[in-house]
């Protein structure tokens, strides 16, 4: 029942009055002012704009009706009909959500359709209850004595099968009929009894007809009315077919002979001798197999022992060499030239060890590379730069500073090895580029005799000498790959598949404005042979390629149709390019035109140019300083520059080999200890320690002692570049890419 607001207000006021009267009746309990204040605080506050309702309005009941109408349904929603080719209104969703819909074919047992189905079928599993209505359709019974007798018999059977109440009711009806007949007609008692019995039998027969119709014959089986399904299967009979073949009859020949006793005896003797020979041969084969197996087992054991012995001998050899070269080992670690304190802006190099191998004395050092994981281990490639005097073999030797007398690993090939690279993540994987255009991958943990991968076929190799090779970043699928550049003007990407090398052409180096008339009058694009390459330190998709024409092309692995930038670097072949370790936009290049140039990315003109007086074979940035780099020349000298000390000339020029007899070819800095390794044309690799003036570290200012050396080196280089990178007035840096045919 709804409550009225007036009733609530009257009740509260009545309670307040009762409390006030009670307090007054008590006559004590505090001051009256306090009581009034307390009463005012207990009264309800009524807003000024509240409606004043009468008692009838307050007592009126407000009925709220909840309807299932969804007010959030969109009534003007349209969808596009592809059949009609226009937008049509979408049907409104209903308010009912169907959770489960299952269509079945079950029939209720009391329905008329179920009764008809039961009559049509001949089996029923249990007696059905009588329906509450009379059957409309009944089976027609044919007239005849035999049929009548059968029906009577069935009726008698049904009488026995009826339930107790129904049977008693029928008997009572029969008795009443008999008494009435006796009362009406007293004469012919026997005839009346017979007539009454006949009527009773007729009534019983008429009442038992429906039950007889449903339960006649044998018991019927009712179909499951809740889980019924019809199943049928039709198997496919394969057709028979006859297959006939016709063959050539075998050749026939007639043979005749006389078979005597001694002939049979001789044949048996020959067969016995053949079997004895076969048995002896099998025994010998078994003995040989056992001997070979024992020999293989012994050879495997001997090989394992040799490996263990070899490791022990290597450790012993290192100990002996360290004792022999104890003074050099101390200089390698702790040498500091005291004369540098009196020489400002100059330094020198201290020769340490010389690494050489007997079989490579007449070969050129074609490449030098330190292992990225083991700082004291470096690889040296041996081949020939003289194309008229190529050797029939090449070597890759891995030397260690701990044992300068003999290489730890030796890889031999059928032609000269021109370049190599060691994987930065897997330091045991070494890839080499050969003079004949092939590439090979070796696993140093396994045998160095056979390569893990090698390029095969005419289409799976370079057409000319491979000048430089570099490992690339792993692909998205985790596959290892590397890149190579050759004199044939192509840059290849090699992917290490499961059993082979998969090669893809990244870019073909075409000359700018290199269209010339061919012999048949058509235009031919000239290629520029690649001589070196290097990847960007931060963006692995960008790489620089040096060519034999003196150009440096900035390329990308993402596309091969354009050069990102073209630098007119040198007048002769570009030998080497190297990025600065502290600023990836700065790189240095050297070539056969005697010059070393320092470049900034996307600037067509070099920042620094140095003329060394002879062809420069290699140039490298120092890993510990942002302004120090070194170069080697064909005069046998090593030039070390520090741009922060002197921007015009080298601070150290030192001859390592005789000028007329030998030439320096390659150079490499150690990543951890300040020393360099240089190679010459006689197959000798020399290590040199840098003096303190060549490896000066930047001192942080007093107020910024927390700065690390990397930040200080970067700021030092930026200050230097700010002095030389300003362009003349009106000049704009061209950044348009050059189109290349690919």
Image (tube, rainbow, N blue to C red):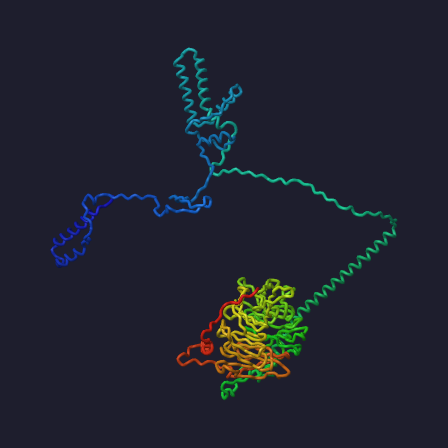
Residue depicted at x 40% and y 19%: 176
Q: Position of residue 244 (x, y in %)?
A: 72, 43
Nearest the camera: 172 or 410? 410
Say whether residue 33 is left or right of residue 500.
left
In which quadrant of the rendered view does residue 32 lie?
Answer: bottom left
Q: Is residue 283 above or below residue 449?
A: above
Q: How many marks?
A: 0
Relative to the observer, which residue lies in front, 315 or 656? 656
Relative to 672, is 266 on the left or the right?
A: right
Quarter of the figure with the C terminus: bottom right
Q: Say which quadrant the N terminus sits in.
A: top left
Give the residue furthest to the front. 521
Between residues 359 and 102, which one lies in front from this camera angle? 359
Residue 403 seen in render = no
Using the rendered view, name the quadrant where residue 300 is placed: bottom right
Residue under the point 51% across and 85% down: 346
Q: Tell me where residue 272 sits by quadrant.
A: bottom right
Please tell me which residue lies in front, 192 or 696: 696
Q: Is residue 698 visible?
A: yes
Q: Residue at x 66, y 71 (%)?
A: 415
**Residue 106 locus on image (x, y percent):** 46, 36
Residue 679 to residue 265: above or below: below
Measured as percent of width and height from the top left, residue 16 is found at: 16, 52
């Amino acid at each position: 029942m709804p409550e009225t607001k007036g009733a609530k207000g009257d009740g509260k006021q009545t309670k307040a009055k009762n409390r006030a009267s009670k307090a007054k009746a008590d006559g004590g309990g505090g001051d009256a002012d306090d009581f009034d204040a307390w009463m005012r605080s207990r009264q309800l506050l009524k807003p000024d704009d509240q409606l004043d309702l009468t008692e009838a309005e307050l007592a009126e009941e407000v009925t709220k009706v909840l309807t299932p109408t969804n007010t959030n349904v969109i009534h003007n929603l349209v969808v596009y009909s592809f059949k009609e080719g226009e937008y049509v209104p979408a049907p409104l969703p209903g308010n009912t959500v169907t959770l489960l819909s299952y269509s079945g074919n079950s029939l209720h047992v009391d329905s008329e359709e179920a009764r008809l189905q039961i009559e049509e079928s001949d089996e029923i599993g249990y007696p059905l209850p009588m329906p509450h209505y009379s059957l409309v359709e009944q089976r027609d019974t044919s007239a005849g004595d035999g049929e009548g007798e059968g029906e009577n018999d069935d009726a008698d059977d049904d009488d026995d099968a009826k339930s107790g109440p129904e049977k008693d009711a029928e008997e009572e009806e029969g008795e009443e009929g008999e008494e009435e007949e006796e009362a009406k007609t007293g004469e012919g008692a026997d005839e009346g009894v017979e007539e009454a019995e006949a009527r009773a039998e007729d009534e019983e027969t008429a009442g038992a007809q429906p039950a007889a119709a449903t339960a006649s014959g044998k018991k019927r089986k009712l179909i499951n009315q809740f889980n019924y399904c019809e199943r049928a299967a039709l198997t496919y009979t394969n057709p028979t077919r006859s297959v006939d073949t016709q063959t050539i009859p075998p050749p026939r020949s007639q043979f005749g002979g006389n078979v005597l006793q001694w002939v049979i005896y001789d044949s048996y003797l020959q067969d016995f001798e053949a079997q004895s020979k076969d048995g002896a041969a099998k025994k010998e084969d078994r003995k040989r197999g056992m001997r070979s197996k024992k020999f293989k087992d012994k050879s495997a054991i001997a090989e394992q022992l040799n490996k263990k012995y070899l490791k022990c001998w290597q450790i012993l050899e290192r100990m002996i060499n360290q004792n022999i070269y104890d003074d050099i080992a101390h200089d390698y670690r702790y040498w500091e030239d005291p004369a540098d304190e009196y020489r400002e802006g100059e330094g020198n190099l201290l020769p340490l060890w010389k690494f050489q191998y007997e079989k490579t004395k007449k070969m050129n050092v074609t490449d030098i590379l330190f292992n990225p994981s083991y700082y004291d281990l470096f690889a040296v490639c041996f081949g020939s730069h003289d194309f008229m005097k190529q050797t029939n073999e090449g070597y890759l030797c891995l030397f260690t500073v701990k044992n300068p007398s003999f290489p730890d690993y030796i890889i031999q090939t059928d032609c000269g090895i021109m370049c190599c690279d060691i994987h930065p993540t897997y330091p045991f994987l070494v890839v080499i580029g050969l003079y004949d255009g092939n590439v090979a991958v070796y696993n140093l943990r396994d045998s160095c005799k056979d390569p893990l991968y090698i390029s095969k076929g005419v289409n799976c190799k370079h057409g000319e000498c491979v000048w430089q090779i570099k490992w690339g970043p792993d692909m998205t699928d985790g596959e290892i790959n590397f890149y190579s550049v050759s004199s044939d003007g192509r840059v290849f990407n090699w992917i290490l598949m499961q059993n082979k090398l998969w090669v893809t052409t990244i870019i073909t180096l075409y000359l700018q404005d290199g269209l010339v008339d061919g012999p048949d009058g058509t235009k031919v694009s000239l290629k520029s042979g690649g001589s070196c390459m290097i990847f960007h330190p931060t963006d692995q998709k960008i790489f620089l390629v040096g060519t034999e024409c003196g150009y440096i092309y900035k390329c990308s692995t993402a596309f091969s149709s354009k050069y990102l930038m073209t630098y007119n670097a040198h007048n002769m072949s570009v030998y080497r390019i190297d990025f600065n370790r502290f600023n990836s936009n700065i790189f240095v290049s050297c070539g056969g035109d005697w010059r070393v140039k320092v470049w900034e990315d996307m600037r067509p003109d070099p920042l620094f140019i140095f003329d060394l007086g002879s062809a420069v074979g290699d140039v490298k940035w120092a890993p510990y300083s942002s302004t120090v780099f070194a170069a080697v020349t064909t005069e046998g000298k090593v030039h070390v520059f520090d741009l922060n000390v002197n921007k015009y000339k080298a601070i150290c020029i030192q001859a390592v080999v005789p000028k007329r007899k030998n030439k320096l070819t390659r150079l490499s800095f150690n990543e951890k200890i300040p020393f360099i390794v240089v190679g010459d044309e006689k197959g000798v690799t020399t290590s040199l320690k840098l003096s303190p003036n060549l490896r000066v570290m930047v001192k942080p200012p007093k107020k910024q002692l927390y700065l690390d050396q990397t930040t200080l080196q970067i700021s030092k280089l930026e200050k230097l570049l700010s002095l030389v990178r300003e362009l003349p007035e009106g000049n704009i840096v061209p950044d348009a890419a050059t189109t290349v045919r690919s």
